[in-house]
Image: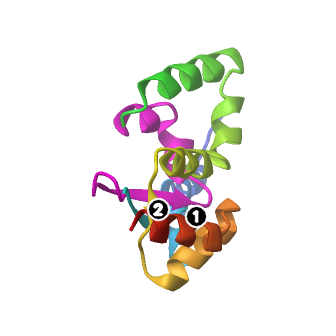
Amino acid sequence: MYNGPGNSVIADAVSLLILLLPFILKLCGIGAKRVWMKNPATGKLEKGFFGFSWTYLYFGWWVPLIRGETGIAFLYLLATILTVGIWQLVVSFLYNRQYTGRLIEKGFKFCDEVPVNLRAAHALGVDLDMHRSQIAARG
């Protein structure tokens, strides 16, 4: 069967679109957003994220491994293998929320610009008033 040059061009265009899709959607405001977080006890700054994780979709369990979450990385690798990759697609919608939630559990607080903090708190289901009062109490 002959796959003339037209089919090759279409396949190349689809491949390019798949590779560029995260960047295109990011320009449209779709995907992960960053929020700076600070641990008042240690002074350490970390980037928290909220929204869909293209990074997790493409790189899977490597993302928590690179962020220093070895146990989480191992569990996610195991789940990805057991579900033949479906886990990786599902967790792409959840990973940033989970990661930032773990930062909050470790004592990190939002320290970005107010509109960013508000969007992050809303997306993550964090009560920002409670969040602020905890910062003031430790202050």
**Left or right: 126 as drawn, with respect to 58:** right
> Is disc 2 surrounded by few (<14), some (14 to 19) or many (20+) residues within 10 Å?
many
Residue 68 found in image quarter:
top left
Which of labels 1 and 2 is toward the front?
2
Which of the 4 image quarters holds residue 57?
A: top right
Magenta span contains residue 36: no
Viewer-nearest residue: 65 or 38: 38
Q: Residue at x 68, y 70 (%)?
A: 122
Considering every residue shown, the one lying at the far left of the view is: 43
User: Residue at the front extreme?
Assistant: 137
Query: Can you say which quadrant of the picture contains the N terminus?
Result: top right
Residue 31 disc label:
1
73 in relation to 132, above or below: above
Q: Position of residue 107 (x, y in %)?
A: 46, 50
Camera sees residue 29: no
Q: Position of residue 64 (x, y in %)?
A: 45, 36
Residue at the (61%, 75%) spot, across then down: 119
Q: Nearer the viewer, residue 123 or 87?
A: 123
Q: Earlier in the sequence, mark 1 or mark 2?
A: 1
Within the magenta stretch, is there residue 59?
A: yes
Q: What amino acid does circle 2 point to? A: Lys
Question: Can I make out residue 104 in this image?
Answer: yes
Query: Residue tagged by mark 2?
Result: 109
Determine the residue positioned at 63% across, 35% down: 88
Mark 1 surroundings: few (<14), some (14-19) or many (≥20) residues within 10 A: some
Residue 35 x/y as whole percent: 46, 67
Q: Secondary structure at mark 1?
A: loop
Q: Which residues are magenta?
A: 40-67
- The reply, left or right, for residue 93 in relation to residue 34 is right
Which residue is located at x 57 percent, y 60 percent? Answer: 50
Q: Disc 1 marks which amino acid?
A: Gly
In the rendered image, the vertical position of residue 86 relative to residue 138, given as above or below: above
